Image: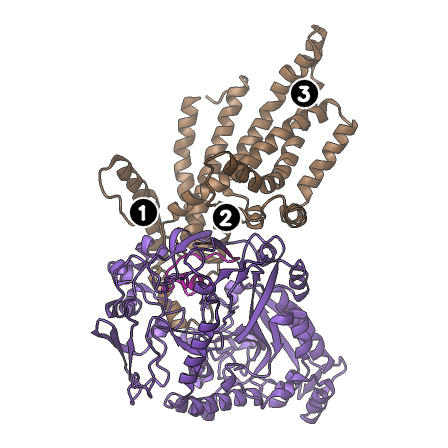
Chain colours: A purple, B brown
Amino acid sequence: MRLRTLLLGAAAAVAITPAALAERGSDGEVKIIYWQAPSTMNPYLSGGTKELEAASLVVEPLARYDQDGNMVPWLAESVPTVDNGGVSSDLTTITWKLREGLLWSDGSPVTSADVVFTWKYCADPAGGCAQSEKYNDVTDVKAVDDLTVTVTFGVPKPFPYGPFVGAQAPIIQAAQFADCLGAKAPECTDANFGPIGTGPFQVTDFRPNDVISLEANPNYRDPAKPAFATVTFKGGGDTASAGRSVLETGEFDYAWNMQLAPDVLGAMESAGKGTVVSAFGTLVERIMINLTNPDPALGDERSTKAHPHPFLSDPAVRQALSMAIDRALLVEIGYGSAGRPSCNVLPAPEIYKSTANDGCLVQDIEGAKALLDGAGWVPGADGIRAKDGVRLSILYQTSTNAVRQDFQALIKQWWSDIGVETELRNIDASVFFGGDPGSPDTFQKFYADVEMYANNFDGTDPEAYMANWECKQAPTPETQWQGNNMPRYCSEEYDALVAKMAQTGKLEDRATLAKAMNDKLMQEYIILPLVDRGRVSAHSNTLGGVIMNVWDSELWNAADWYRTKTQ
Amino acid sequence: MLNYTIRRLLLAIPTLIAISLIIFLLLDLAPSDPTANLPLTIPPEVREKIRQSLGLGDPIYIRYLLWCKQFFINEPLNILEQWLGWGEGDRLRVLSWQTRSPVVDLIVERTPQTLWVVGMSYVVGVAIALPIGIISAYRQYSWFDQIGTFVSMVGFSVPTFFTGVLVIVIFSVWLGWFPSIYDTTHEVTDWESFLFQVRQMIMPVAVLALFNAAQISRFMRASMLDNLNQDYVRTARAKGLRERTVVLIHVLRNSLIPVVTVIALGVPQIFGGAIITEQVFKVNGLGQLLIISIQGGDLPTVQTLTFIFAVLIIVFNLVADVLYGILDPRIRYD
């Protein structure tokens, strides 16, 4: 069974981490800088990455993902599976067993009641829990005994590792949050800023959107860890200055999310004080093709299924657009070591990665031209191709971001080489991604021919992500423009694959299905993947034990961090 | 003068209420969404629930009145009760959407660093601007005046996001003299920690002081020049007064009147913080709070902060007017 080998691997990885260090708190202070400052320590009240990661130093889930995307038991003794009897054969219940002897940082024991409470806290409809997706379909969570909980789902869950797994769904202390259920959740400022946890550190001072001071948790389960006595977690500023403080001045030990131009980052690293680390997950920068007509003249029916797109509904045009793009050059200019060309919208984990579409890695302008010629799109007097009076003229929108505007300019040039006219547009990210049904500029409304952004999924299971392109997920006026199927793709075959995956439990079969869905989207050119974007961070050369992780919080193994003695 | 002050203060009340309403409407009409910055992995249904839990489902007048109640009634009563020890003082306060904590606490937490850095830069700026303005005017077109003009133009026209990064690269990266990141948790307890505080303040204060000094020194110079050619100056000199007395007592006093007004009107800007400089040096004061609240669509925080700025601007306008009346006996408001 795969999961078991994974667990062994994870155990081995834990064993390799330096055992040379003797006692808790012997290495003094570690300074972390996040250029976006965390605004709360309660991950259930903020879905932001910065808050999740800061909180992961304090509160922990039952199981989490390691650097390879494998699930490792964290507060639980083991990861329940069908094989070890932890998951029922009808896939509707999962039984977790807590490790024995776990203590909260205040010294009280961790019990199954805390786990049950955590679910109640997030499931309360008035609380606005940002992670309620993790607890989808959970009908009940019961404490069997002090250390055992059973989660019951309303439907069969082939992948029952949503609740209590990963940085998004940690266990919070029932005693501390007892009066903070539902609408009262935001009023518990002290608890939200200083949650009692089981993690290696506890909060001593929390200044929202500024700085967090933490100290080693005296009741942490491993008496020798963490090696650091205190953590200073500074927030604010910008990416470049955060990178500078680690790589050039050495004031900080760890800087998160170093999204900088490759040459800027390279120059900083050459100062010799720190190291840039990256790892790849599922984040793909992609171009979405609008299969419906965004013509303003259509009024309310703009960008809805009622009107197919005048030329993007032709697969030859979509394929030609993809063939004209030089993905390797985009990576070189925009991301350097933090990106790699991608031909899949589902690029990872390894078992889900398709190799059927790798042809897109090579730019083929002549081939694209020939394809358009063959499909009857011929250049007019102005060099722009047309057929039956329809010109290939594209409105290309994305959010405002230096790299994205570079990409737009390059792609516009390539498309003009094959006779496609492109008008560029960029929209402020908070509006573009804002989802305000009243705004015409959101990525859901998609009042453009193509749009570019990046997306990924939490954890390692792609089921929900691949279901994004189900027919019913298309944003429409009836659904207040909610939905993830931006291309308005609609295929019975695809929907059947989604339905099948929802009932398939075996990992290998799930992988086959996911690959089939990915290939279908790719080979119909509904989505043009561009770049598989990695997470990039920087750490000081004197900070040891950092293992970059894209599947969970980057600070997931902060308990194992230490100060290297050789400067 | 007292009647005038009271009249002005009373007039300020409807003005401020109107301002608060305008701010609220502007913020509400602007396209912003508190859930916009969340990762795309959070589904729309959950976003909708978050919006509902923030009270965005209520009609606009309810939200405005709620803010008014929380800010004008609950907050002052809470503070009063806590001071006097009468009650719990736990009425519902204005809560930030980003941090889910009381906005007023956030503001109180951030005021010290803003006052230290931005306030100090204003004091330093004024302290160097006045002598420069005086000497520049007295020795008009001399080399000192030319250099002063040049420096003012540089300070005025080069943006702080450039000078800030420039000094960081020179003094933090190359020379390693000063920290590039301001430590807001630092407490001054002894001589050594005081020196650290000075070191971490030098760069942001210098950058901002250059900007402030540039502005004020030009006012000072212009005002001095206006007065130096007046008849009363000639009279003073004719009486045989020393040049020092003529310039520093007679001319300076008279020229300071408009400058004091300018300086007083600039004080609210200190509380507004210096958005860019605070970001560059990670001072994380009021300016940074304002900008991240705007980015995060945190309407209660933006509303409360901008309203407090409005109050300060009105108050310091009044202070400037009153000071003017005190300094210049010819001016009477009643």
Q: Are marks 1 and 3 on the same chain?
A: yes
Q: Are marks 2 and 1 in contact (CB under 8 Å)?
A: no
Which numbered disc, 3 or 2, marks the residue that appears first in the sequence? 3
Callout 2, which amino acid? Asn
Depth check, mark 3 against mark 2: the one in front is: 2
User: Is residue B202 at all visible to an observer of this figure?
Assistant: yes
Q: Is residue B103 magenta?
A: no
Name the residue at the top extreme: B239
Vertical position of residue A477 compared to residue B137: above or below: below
Q: Amino acid at mark 1?
A: Lys
Q: x, y percentage for residue A407?
A: 65, 71
**Which residue was labeled with disc 2?**
B284
Magenta segment range? Answer: A31-57
Asked if both marks, 3 and 2, belong to the same chain, the answer given is: yes
| Residue at 58% across, 60% down | A541
Asked if labels 2 and 3 touch by Cβ distance under 8 angstroms, the answer is no
Count up the numbered dots: 3
CA–CA distance in space, label 3 to label 2: 42 Å
Q: Are marks 2 and 1 on the same chain?
A: yes
Identify the mark nearer the N-term, 2 or 1: 1
**Callout 3 amino acid:** Asn
The residue sitting at 53% across, 31% down in the picture is B264
Which residue is labeled 3 in the image?
Answer: B227
What SS does tag 1 mark?
A: helix
